[in-house]
Image (tube, rainbow, N blue to C red):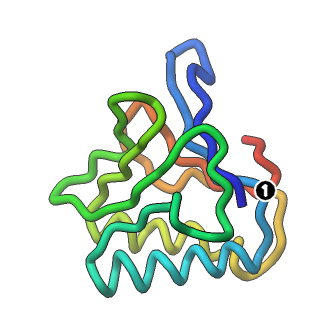
Amino acid sequence: MKLDFIDNINEFGENVVRLYDFDKEESIKLRDLIINTIVKKKQRLDLYKVDFIENRNCNLILGLFKTDEGILSSDNETFYCALTIDNYLNMLKLMEPFCLNNTKGYQYLYDIDNPTDFLFSPAGTW
């Protein structure tokens, strides 16, 4: 599984933080990490420290927040995903098809009015 940031993906100046190049087994590992670290323990999950994720040009830290802010960054290198527990639970539902089958599809992991989207895509495309 690889993690990267792509700036200005369209004419609106939007960006994407992308998890890609993974299979069903890695989807399951990430899902379980989110469940155990964020949902159960209420702790942050720093993807830089996850052994099966290769950080290409950025790092992403997932954490709980009182409101759904989405992915934020001040330097386009370290990103923070600030979501409520309800949105993390929804994220887990959106990831579930990738945990059941190897698929070529993709999924945005939240729907928030934010300039940076969070893409989950085995093939890296959208």
Residue 119 left/right relative to 90: right
Task: Find residue 71 and report its horizontal and vertical position in percent.
Answer: 39, 44
Residue drawn at x 82%, y 66% is 103
Relative vertical location of residue 68 with respect to residue 88 in this rendering, above or below:
above
Q: Position of residue 28 (x, y in %)?
A: 65, 80
Against 110, residue 38 (above or below) is below
Residue at 63%, 70% in the rendered image: 51
Closer to the camera in the image, 51 or 43: 51
Could you tell me residue 120's position as x and y percent? 64, 55
In the displayed structure image, the side of residue 90 where residue 53 appears, left or right: right
Pointer 1: residues within 10 angstroms few (<14), some, or many (20+)?
some
Quadrant occupied by the N terminus: bottom right
Q: Which residue is mark 1?
A: 21
Nearer to the camera, 109 or 19: 19
Estimate the x, y position of residue 100 in percent, counting from the top left: 73, 82
- Where is residue 79, by image quadrant? top left
Q: Amino acid at mark 1?
A: Asp
**Residue at 77% from the left image edge and 76% from the top image edge:** 24
Q: Quadrant of the C terminus?
A: top right
Relative height, residue 11 to residue 119 (above, below) = above
Residue 44 figure quarter: bottom left
Q: Residue furthest top?
A: 11
Res 57 visible:
yes
- Residue 35 shown left or right of residue 23 in the figure: left
Label 1 sits on a secondary structure element that is loop
Residue at the image position 80 percent from the left and 77 percent from the top: 101
Instruction: Count the marks.
Output: 1
**Would you say residue 106 is visible in this rendering?**
no
